[in-house]
Image: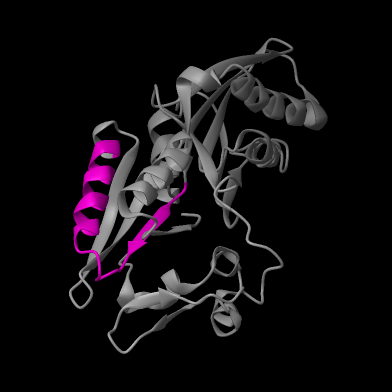
């Protein structure tokens, strides 16, 4: 994704308008868009955005939790001698989710049921031979709840059933599949096995009056990158202004420190836009 002066509507909206699902309309009504001077330098308008009653700092809600220590976390749930082995993992797209399910299914048993959640729109579940609605939906319902409680967003859960000789019935199956996923999350060591990350952040700089600011921005970002708290996803240079726009993936616990460091390095001549990936 290329960001910068040439796709100005991405960078020029206030945070609330940019986060709006109706961004196309917000472009026409946002009063905090920058304006272009005769010198071609982008500057922020001083008026308050008409779409927002107050300036809201949104990046505290823009976070996702990822599993970092192992490829996946596993736990076993037992119900009437049947074992339900649940594996949960962080994924970034549906292809990764399907690959995980293919790689970690047990082909010797009949049921490898799963669900995934990637953002709000990309959700899928499968009963894999169990009675309709008894496996995939209960798994997905747990993933929906963990999004709200633990900030897990892009996650896949697969539950493999090993039959123990006693039928559970539809209600029992629903409780067992949901319980297996719940237990997997409960046994996950959030402090040592996971990390909170910002979904994505744009650092936009376009101030021709201070040519050394670009160098200062890069040095600051490189320091955080060397500590593995920031990853540079993309950058675009503006030859007219000498500015630069950086697209970064940032550890959530480093957001405030990064913003403070960049503001200090440039005397506040950087602009941040936080948005969901």
Q: Quadrant of the N terminus?
A: bottom left
Q: At which x and y percent is residue 136?
A: 64, 40
Determine the residue positioned at 39% across, 26% down.
71
- In this rendering, would 250 be left or right of 19? left
Q: Is residue 111 visible?
A: no
**In the image, residue 106 above or below residue 248:** above
Instruction: Specify whether residue 213 is painted magenta.
Output: yes
Query: Can you name the residue that lies furthest to the top here?
Result: 81
**In the image, residue 183 above or below residue 127:** above
Q: Nearer the viewer, residue 258 or 43?
A: 43
* Residue 162 placement: quadrant: top right
Query: Can you name the residue that lies furthest to the bottom here?
Result: 38
- In this rendering, would 64 be left or right of 219? right
Query: In the image, which residues are magenta?
Result: 199-224
Determine the residue positioned at 42% across, 38% down.
257
Instruction: Specify whether residue 117 is painted magenta.
Output: no
Q: Nearer the viewer, residue 139 or 34?
A: 34
Q: At which x and y percent is residue 196?
A: 49, 34
* Residue 151 placement: quadrant: top right
Q: At which x and y percent is residue 140?
A: 65, 41
């Amino acid at each position: 994704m290329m960001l910068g002066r040439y796709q100005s509507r991405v960078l020029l909206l206030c945070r609330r308008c940019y986060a709006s699902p109706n961004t196309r309309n917000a472009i026409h009504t946002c009063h905090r868009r920058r304006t272009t001077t005769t010198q071609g330098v982008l500057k922020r308008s001083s008026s308050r955005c008409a779409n927002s009653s107050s300036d809201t700092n949104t990046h505290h809600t823009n976070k996702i939790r990822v599993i970092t220590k192992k490829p996946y976390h596993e736990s076993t749930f037992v119900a009437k001698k049947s074992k339900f082995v649940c594996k949960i993992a962080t994924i970034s797209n549906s292809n990764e989710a399907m690959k995980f399910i293919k790689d970690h299914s047990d082909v010797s048993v009949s049921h490898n049921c799963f669900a995934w959640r990637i953002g709000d729109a990309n959700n899928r579940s499968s009963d894999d031979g169990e009675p309709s609605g008894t496996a995939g939906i209960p798994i997905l319902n747990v993933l929906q709840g963990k999004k709200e409680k633990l900030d897990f967003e892009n996650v896949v859960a697969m539950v493999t059933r090993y039959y123990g000789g006693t039928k559970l019935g539809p209600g029992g199956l629903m409780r067992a599949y949901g319980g297996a996923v719940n237990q997997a999350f409960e046994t996950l060591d959030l402090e040592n096995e996971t990390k909170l990350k910002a979904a994505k952040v744009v650092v936009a700089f376009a101030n021709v009056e201070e040519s050394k600011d670009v160098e200062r921005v890069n040095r600051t970002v490189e320091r955080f990158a060397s500590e593995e708290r920031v990853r540079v996803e993309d950058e675009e240079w503006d030859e007219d202004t000498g500015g630069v726009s950086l697209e970064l993936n940032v550890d959530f616990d480093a957001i405030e420190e990064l913003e403070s460091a960049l503001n200090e390095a440039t005397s506040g001549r950087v602009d941040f836009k936080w948005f969901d990936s």
